[in-house]
Amino acid sequence: MARAINRFVCQSCGAVTSKWSGRCESCGEWNTITEEAGLAPGPAGGGGLARGGPGRHRGRTLEFADLTGSTPQPPRYKSGIIEFDRVCGGGLVVGSALLIGGDPGIGKSTLLLQVAAALAKQHTACAYVSGEEAIDQVRLRAERLGLGGAPVQLTAATSVRDIVATLERPDAPRVAVIDSIQTMWLDTVESTPGTVTQVRASAQALVELAKRRGIAVLLVGHVTKDGAIAGPRVLEHMVDTVLYFEGERGHQFRILRTVKNRFGPTDEIGVFEMSDRGLSDVANPSALFLAERRGHVSGACVFAGIEGTRPVLVEIQALVSPSALGTPRRAVVGWDSNRLAMVLAVLEARCGVSIGANDVYLNVAGGLRISEPAADLAVAAAVVSSLADEPVPADMAVFGEIGLGGEVRPVGQREARLREAAKLGFRSALAPRGRSGSGPAPRPPEGIIVDEIEHLADLVARFQPADRPLEKRREAGPGQRRE
């Protein structure tokens, strides 16, 4: 029998070392290495496994199957919360494990309590296991959300052994919410709750329970200061679906984003609106993101994007102002700052636009975070519009990827973007030219005119005066003439 030995595990990344040190060599974090108990490794090479000498247990022979064949669709529990079911791929799959992470106070517990109540009202037995709050606290939240009459089974527990024993009963619920996985502990692991070893062991026990008993398990996970789910990275590999709940404290909108889904599409989003009655679905996110938009303002441009399978229109705002500092500022909210630096460099090097001495501020209105390269052209249009103090047409939607040579590259799902823009009343679109060799481009939706461009210089020419390069015009003081 292997004897117990001590090992040192980083609580940030899960790296294992043979001795303690102040700084983890894998992730670079300080004071995250703690001592934990473990098992000594088995014989080198595991030579006895393959040969199976006397007294050894031989493994059973596995059977292989062909790729061809029919596999029935897995049954799902549909909650009736449209945005949540969309992100899950059509509902919760029976026997699956789902992990949802997000910042503190963003609404993870509220969302899952609403999901459990919606399922329970449809005669699907649901249990809510709270490891952070007492039963009375969960009841108070349910009363505030108007869910006090939902037949959800509540309990407060942190012992995984007790939870598994309860869910093993024949009359156990079919959906279980565990809030949160960082508070769970297993008595067979000699470490405190929240450590890498405890989180990994507790999650493994709950995932095995879900597969064995056909219970849909929903796990709540805390996130680190960098926005990643706390605990070992293997936690995201163990579960079937990983969701991130995003949003800004100052906005009422919340975005539920799929990062991993074995039973549906990834990069899908669900949009919710937070109120004193909880979270409610947003049927038309584009109209909501553009509700506070003001037309004929320089530096504002509407981007026609794709989030998962859904086209979304959002306003991108840019402000270019003369800098009083030796090093101009570049502040970005809702987009990649490295991508903005690339777009600014292409504008200067390929189009002759002078931006270097100005501060540049970029914001995606509504709290949405954009990651697709198709927003390059909309960002460039917003920056050039602010620099020239000339507004982008209020009824124009923009999308396209920019290359380092200044060329505007085609992007996917062009027709879906144009249809969404036409549905919201936009009359024109600035887009890249279609791919050559793919046949004639399909006709745009009725009521919208597409202006195709091939180079970023074509965009700059719309705002650049004919007699001088484009540069930021300073506001003139009293009695002075504006340049």
Image (cartoon, helix red, strand yellow):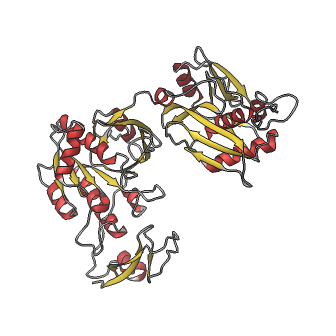
Q: Nearer the viewer, residue 260 or 52?
A: 260
Q: Residue at left 36%, top 78%?
A: 51
Give the x, y percent position of residue 276: 31, 37
User: With respect to residue 26, does 135 lie above or below?
Assistant: above
- Image label count: 0
Q: Single out the residue that lies furthest toward the front.
A: 479
User: With respect to residue 416, does 103 lie above or below?
Assistant: below
Is any atom of residue 155 visible in this view? yes
Q: Nearer the viewer, residue 443 or 180?
A: 180
Give the x, y percent position of residue 131: 24, 58
Q: Residue at left 76%, top 27%?
A: 462
| Figure quadrant of residue 146 | top left
Is any atom of residue 40 visible in this view? no
User: With respect to residue 417, does 54 lie above or below?
Assistant: below
Say whether residue 394 is left or right of residue 214. right
Say whether residue 166 is left or right of residue 299. left
Q: Residue at left 79%, top 39%?
A: 353
Give the x, y percent position of residue 101: 38, 52
Give the x, y percent position of residue 1: 27, 84
Q: Residue at left 17%, top 52%?
A: 135
Q: Quadrant of the C terminus?
A: top right
Q: Single out the residue that lies furthest toward the top.
A: 447
| Figure quadrant of residue 251 | top left
Say whether residue 359 is left or right of residue 170. right
